[in-house]
Image (cartoon, rainbow, N blue to C red):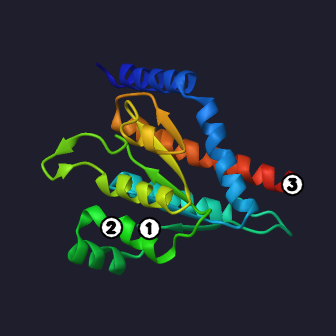
Amino acid sequence: MGNREFVQHYFAEMHKVIDDISIADIDRAVELLFAAWKREGQVFTCGNGGSASTATHFACDLAKTTIVDDRKRFRAYCLNDNIPLVSALINDDGFDNLFYEQLKNSFREGDVLICISVHGGAGSDKAGLWSQNLLKAMKYASDNGGKTIGLSGFDGGPMKDIADACIVVPIDSTPQVESFHLVLEHLICARLRQKIAES
């Protein structure tokens, strides 16, 4: 396969994802976040690997790009960003508890947790189960009066059944899923800014 054929195939996959992704699930995620904004709830984001950078990006965009003059602002924080705390928690309590332990410090009833995972917490690798720290954090948020949003891919994994809203990027391709997670966070933040301006 030459470069042109590869590019055409890659773009064709992107078109199919756009055609197949659930707009209803995106709508649910937007409404959960807008409700949190209205009640001045906090929003926490987290992810592993490439999804960690998407989680940081999402928290940044919620806090900055949704700003409308004379309106209250989102209180958004990424659980991946405090590297000394992250490394201390992993060292003392293990990777499984990385996000769960941070939520115990700050999460309150009515807050929202956004977890980002290519496989939605499913599968196993040489290090054991994937992304169980996300699922544990989601359970904590749900058990403590919060709402949960998942950004997943492939078949959605366990996250699809746990989250209050889960947007699944319906393709078995890690690069495509990670790319679309960024598209989704930009789309969600753009719509939230519009809703805030109209409120």
Looking at the rendered structure, the secondary structure element under dot 1 is loop
* Mark whose residue sits in front, 1 or 2: 2
Measured as percent of width and height from the top left, residue 132 is found at 30, 53
Q: Are marks 2 and 3 in contact (CB under 8 Å)?
A: no
Q: Are marks 1 and 2 in contact (CB under 8 Å)?
A: yes
Between the C-alphas of marks 1 and 2, the distance is: 9 Å
* Numbered badge on residue 79: 1
Image quadrant occupied by the N terminus: top left
What amino acid type should be assigned to the residue bearing mark 1?
Leu
Left-right relation of 123 to 156: left
Looking at the rendered structure, the secondary structure element under dot 3 is loop
Looking at the rendered structure, the secondary structure element under dot 2 is helix
Residue occupying image coordinates x 35% and y 29%: 172
Q: Nearer the viewer, residue 176 or 157?
A: 157
Residue 63, compared with residue 22, is above or below; it is below
Residue that mark 2 sits on: 98
Residue 185, compared with residue 176, is above or below; it is below
Going from N to C along the chain, the mark reached first, 2 or 3, is 2
Going from N to C along the chain, the mark reached first, 1 or 2, is 1
What amino acid type should be assigned to the residue bearing mark 2?
Leu
Measured as percent of width and height from the top left, residue 12 is found at 47, 20
Quarter assignment of residue 165: top right
Residue occupying image coordinates x 25% and y 71%: 90
Residue 58, compared with residue 97, is above or below; it is above
Classify 10 Å Cα crowding around label 2: few (below 14), some (14-19), many (20 and above). Answer: many
Measured as percent of width and height from the top left, residue 55 is found at 47, 57
Left-right relation of 104 to 26: left
Going from N to C along the chain, the mark reached first, 3 or 1, is 1
Measured as percent of width and height from the top left, residue 14 is found at 49, 27
Residue that mark 3 sits on: 199
